[in-house]
Amino acid sequence: MCDGTAKPLVIGVHVNENTMREPNPHIPWTPAEIAATAAASRAAGASLMHFHGRTPDGGVDHSAQTYGETIELVRAATDLLLAPSLANVPGRSVAERLANVAPNQGRPETRADFLVIDMGLAAMDLIDPRSGRFVTDDRVFLNDTRTQAELLDRAGELEMTPYLTSFNVSWTRAIVAHARFRPLPPPLVLAIILGGEEFPAAHPASVAGLRAQVDLLPADLPIEWIVSAYRGNVLEAAEEAIIRGGHVAIGAGDHHYGELGHPSTPELVAHVADLGRRHGRQPATPAQARELLGVSV
């Protein structure tokens, strides 16, 4: 594995999601801002980045132009592996949801490495942490089994590595079922997304929440897994992941980290890199991450 030493630690970054800048101002929105955050995160030890296209005022931008411009600027500044979001809007077809990334796959400067596929269904309503009440009551994310299979097929056609996200055990079981009956390139790249108190759709952002997922992974399938936490602090689970040979994704886009003074994503990366070193795992370079995760050049 890589150079025969302890397995390098892949550190991914979630730089913006759909997060606004209050109370943490360190959320990049424009392509140039995302590229600057990418370069600083790479210098701190990151090897992989997930991002969402945003407008200059923080709105959603699902255009292929914005995604292409962002990737081109990131490629010019750094060698991070890239796993951009799809245009996931309720009711859109697979073709429509791929329309922000597929047109850019023809050029090395604008192509992404991973196709991010959410492998299940979930109620996406958030909870207000102050009142304990749901903020909304009708937000549903739907990727049925047919859609999952279609996206897996499209990943192969677009020469992108599937980046298989899971909120809970039922999603992971679906991933395993697909892997048993279709030729997916090894290893499976499994993104385990935990949830803070605001996001009950996912397993809790804790060691117990992570173990509930990892303990059920089949030993006979080659899997490299990466843990993150949406609307929650991933650091408790991160240490467990590092000890167990997994990887970690972190970012101000996922959680404001007010408990740490609202740090930037590169500062969070440095924290995870130090945690990895304490357990004998050095941050993976993008080249090492490419090898570990089975990403073609």
Image (cartoon, helix red, strand yellow):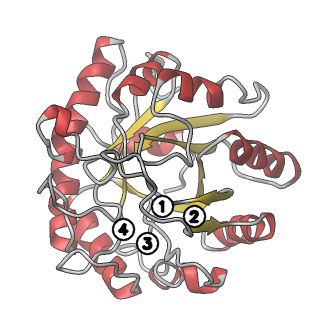
Q: Earlier in the sequence, mark 2 or mark 4?
A: 4
Viewer-side label of 2, 4: 4
* Quarter where residue 170 is shown: top right
The Cα–Cα distance between marks 1 and 2, rounded to whole angstroms, is 5 Å
> Which of marks 3 and 4 precedes in the sequence?
4
Q: Which residue is mark 1?
A: 113
Q: Amino acid at mark 1?
A: Asp
Q: Are marks 4 and 1 in contact (CB under 8 Å)?
A: no
Which residue: 25% across, 65% down? 74
Q: Amino acid at mark 2?
A: Met
Judge from the rendering whether residue 227 lies leftward or rightward of residue 177; answer left or right: left
Q: Amino acid at mark 4?
A: His
* Residue where numbered disc 4 is placed: 52
**Contact (Cβ within 8 Å) of mark 2 with mark 3:** no
User: Residue 111, labelled with which disc?
Assistant: 3
What's the CA distance linking mark 2 and mark 3?
A: 9 Å
Circle 3 crowding by C-alpha within 10 Å: few under 14, some 14–19, many from 20: many
Numbered circle sitting on residue 160: 2
Which label's residue is closer to the chain start, 4 or 1?
A: 4
Check disc 4 and report its element: helix, strand or loop.
Answer: loop
Q: Secondary structure at mark 3?
A: loop
Q: Residue at x 15, y 52 (%)?
A: 24
Considering only vertical position in the picture, is 268 above or below 6? below
Mark 1, other Cα within 10 Å: few <14 / some 14–19 / many ≥20: many
Measure the alpha-carbon separation of dots 4 and 3.
15 Å
Badge 3 vs badge 1, beta-carbon distance below 8 Å: yes
- Relative horizontal placement of residue 100, taking residue 253 as reference (left or right): right
Cα gap from disc 4 to disc 1, whole angstroms: 15 Å
